[in-house]
Image: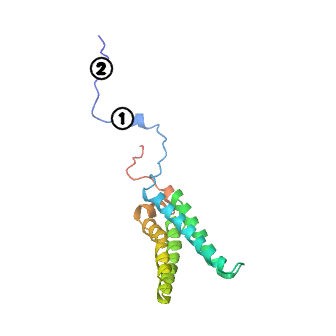
């Protein structure tokens, strides 16, 4: 009499059954902080655009001074997209490094602007400048975290996932 129940061994299957496996190593999953860093990078780009609009509104016309907010907004937007997609800009520059650099520059500019308004005695303008620091601080703090740096590291996709066994 043949039994429908088969005894299972606690040992793994022999290597011969695993030999035909042609699975490519999978990429590590996106870290939880990456989308939030991208959102804060987008906020930095919007804030840079707003500051550029304020400069343009004071003196309508195109001047050299409008180039700085435009470059900062484009850089922050590029960094946000690179972090979200897990890409590097070049072989030497990670996406998180782009986001961090284009978050530090507006951070320093806004701190200088807040200090300038504080010296002039413009209380409400100081608070608005300090409120605008939310975007660069958020992008800087999330973009510089280890999981996000590893996610956007150059050459990350070429590496084999740790813990994966190679078939013999």
Q: Residue furthest top?
A: 1
Q: Nearer the viewer, residue 144 or 77?
A: 77
Q: Residue 35 versus residue 20: which sits nearer the camera?
A: 35
Residue 1 disc label: none
Side of 161 where 52 appears, left or right:
right
From the top left corner, tell me how far across and down residue 163 is, in percent. 37, 50
- Discs 1/2, front: 2
Q: Residues within 10 Å of mark 2 (few under 14, many from 20)?
A: few
Q: Residue furthest right?
A: 61
Q: Is residue 138 visible in this depiction of the protein?
A: yes
Q: Dot 1: few (<14), some (14–19), or many (≥20) neighbours within 10 Å? A: few
Tell me where residue 125 appears, x and y as whole percent: 50, 79
Q: Determine the secondary structure under disc 2.
A: loop
Quadrant for the N terminus, please. top left
Q: According to the image, label 2 marks what residue?
A: 5
* Residue indicated by mark 1: 14
Q: Tell me where residue 63 sits by quadrant.
A: bottom right
Locate residue 90, reporting x and y percent. Answer: 57, 66
Q: Position of residue 129 (x, y in %)?
A: 49, 77
Comes first in the chain, label 1 or label 2: 2
Q: Is residue 90 visible?
A: no
> Residue at image x 54%, y 66%?
79
For the residue labelled by badge 1, is the local secondary structure a helix, a strand or a loop? Answer: loop
Q: Residue at x 41, y 65 (%)?
A: 145
């Amino acid at each position: 009499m043949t039994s429908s129940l088969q005894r299972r061994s606690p040992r793994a299957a022999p290597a011969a059954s695993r030999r035909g496996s042609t699975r490519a190593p999978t990429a590590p999953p996106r870290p939880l902080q990456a989308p939030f860093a991208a959102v804060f990078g987008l906020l930095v780009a919007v804030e840079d655009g707003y500051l550029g609009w304020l400069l343009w509104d004071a003196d309508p016309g195109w001047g050299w001074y409008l180039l700085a907010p435009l470059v900062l907004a484009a850089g922050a937007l590029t960094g946000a997209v690179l972090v979200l997609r897990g890409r590097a800009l070049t072989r030497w520059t990670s996406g998180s490094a782009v986001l961090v650099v284009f978050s530090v520059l507006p951070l320093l500019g806004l701190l200088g602007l807040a200090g300038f308004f504080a010296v002039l005695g413009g209380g409400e303008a100081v608070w608005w400048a300090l409120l605008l620091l939310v975007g660069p601080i958020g992008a800087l703090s999330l973009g510089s975290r280890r999981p996000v740096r590893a996610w956007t590291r150059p050459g990350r996709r070429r590496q084999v996932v740790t813990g994966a066994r190679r078939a013999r």
